[in-house]
């Protein structure tokens, strides 16, 4: 993909790009909808990447082309503001805007974008694009940008330019990811600890199961869950649900709001317990029941699963998974399954059979391998 993006740029412009930059998608091991509640999350960066070949533009307009899109997007990076650009290009233009708003120099650019992060699968394809564009802009401007600040810039692009009310986990995973490590993030202060996650040493694999049931974060359901959480925190008199206990949550009068809050508070506890077990060099098989409990909470209390993901989780367990859960914002997307290495084929076959029995599109199953975060490739 690196070569493809650079070659496409060269073919189009008659000259090589100034550089090629990338940022990865991510899988969240555990910690769903906790990030915008000042809570804890535990993602890792995937080997799947968005790649940007870039150079300063020769004229007064920025142009971006994507191998995945037929159209060419044009905007003025020096003056673009929210509302000027929509669709897929908003993630690019929004990053230019947020980079400029953060006080960094932004010139007009020519960008050639390519990505193998599945779109609509809950693997943060949008954050990968934002962060790849962000490191490209920094590289072209010759400025050093702290990875956490870059993640915040990318998050602002998604929140304020695109209009998706997500937390900052996706972008932080994209910039802080490292091979063989999980990114343990405290979203209250954006502190990061890299936690070892060596599954092969323990005879295990983490399978990612793309159910092919797409989701859309900018839709109303994600925002509705966030509003429920804000209502719960206000009713409890705490800054965020991160500050509440399960006993506090049971005092909430509204059943729906109580269940939403119970998921977030219990999910934070599960994240911390997973980190404790992995820090203590406990066999990672021991986190399987926590993955199961997380899925049950998302299904019953937060109500963000759909039949495709529930069936995939159940089938993975039937096939021999040690634990399985939906990953991502919900309403479609991917499932992860912690699997003994000897059972990967059986788990994959079990899920594929369950989908075939229902006449659904076959899922895509691949190993989730912790990989490096955003940077320059060439």
Image (tube, helix red, strand yellow):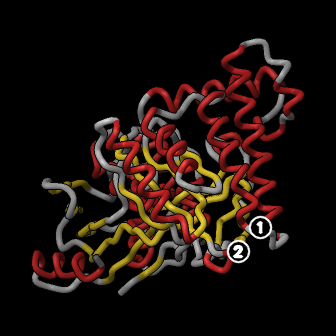
Residue 336 appears left or right of 69: right
Instruction: State whether residue 178 appears in this view.
Output: yes
Q: Is residue 256 left or right of residue 315?
A: right
> Image point 54% across, 65% down: which residue?
343
For mark 1, give the secondary structure.
helix
- The residue drawn where x is 36% and y is 56% is 364
The answer to whether residue 263 is above or below residue 199 is: above
Residue 315 placement, left or right of 132 = right
User: Which labelled disc corresponds to residue 196?
Assistant: 2
Disc 1 to disc 2, how far (Cα)?
7 Å
- Residue 297's disc is none
Q: Which residue is mark 1?
A: 278
Graded by Cα atoms within 10 Å as few (under 14), some (14 to 19) or many (20 or more), the crowding at tag 1 reads many
Which residue occupies the foreground of this view, 63 or 308?
308
Answer left or right for 250 relative to 356.
Answer: right
Picture quarter containing residue 135? bottom left
Looking at the picture, how far across and down is residue 258, in whole percent?
A: 74, 22
């Amino acid at each position: 993909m690196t070569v493809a993006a650079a070659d496409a740029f060269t073919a189009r412009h008659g000259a090589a790009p100034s550089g090629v930059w990338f940022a990865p998608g991510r899988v969240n091991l555990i910690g769903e909808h906790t990030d915008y509640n000042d809570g804890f999350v535990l993602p890792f960066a995937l080997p799947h990447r968005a790649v940007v070949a870039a150079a300063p533009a020769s004229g007064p307009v920025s142009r971006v082309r994507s191998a995945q899109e037929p159209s060419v997007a044009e905007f003025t990076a020096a003056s673009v503001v929210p509302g000027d650009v929509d669709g897929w290009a908003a993630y690019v233009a929004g990053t230019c805007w947020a980079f400029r708003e953060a006080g960094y120099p932004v010139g007009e650019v020519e960008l050639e974008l390519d990505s193998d992060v599945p779109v609509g699968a809950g693997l943060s394809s949008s954050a990968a694009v934002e962060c790849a564009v962000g490191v490209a802009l920094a590289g072209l401007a010759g400025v050093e940008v702290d990875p956490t600040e870059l993640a915040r810039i990318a998050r602002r692009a998604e929140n304020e330019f695109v209009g998706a009310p997500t937390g900052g986990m996706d972008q932080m995973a994209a910039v802080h990811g490292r091979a063989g490590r999980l990114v343990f993030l405290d979203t209250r202060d954006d502190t990061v600890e890299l936690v070892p996650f060596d599954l092969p040493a323990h005879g295990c694999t983490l399978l990612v199961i793309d159910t092919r049931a797409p989701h859309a974060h900018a839709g109303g359901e994600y925002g509705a869950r966030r509003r429920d959480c804000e209502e719960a925190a206000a009713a409890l008199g705490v800054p965020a649900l991160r500050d509440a206990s399960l006993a506090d949550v049971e005092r909430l009068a509204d059943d729906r709001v109580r269940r939403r809050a119970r998921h977030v508070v219990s999910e934070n506890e599960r994240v911390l317990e997973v980190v404790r077990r992995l820090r203590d060099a406990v066999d990672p098989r021991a986190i399987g029941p926590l993955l199961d409990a997380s899925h049950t909470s998302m299904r019953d209390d937060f109500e963000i699963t759909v039949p495709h993901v529930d069936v995939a989780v159940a089938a993975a367990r039937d096939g021999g998974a040690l634990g399985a859960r939906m990953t991502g914002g919900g309403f479609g997307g991917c499932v992860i399954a912690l699997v003994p290495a000897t059972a990967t084929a059986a788990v994959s076959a079990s899920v594929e059979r369950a989908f075939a029995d229902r006449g659904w599109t076959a899922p895509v199953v691949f190993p989730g391998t912790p990989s490096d975060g955003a940077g320059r490739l060439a």
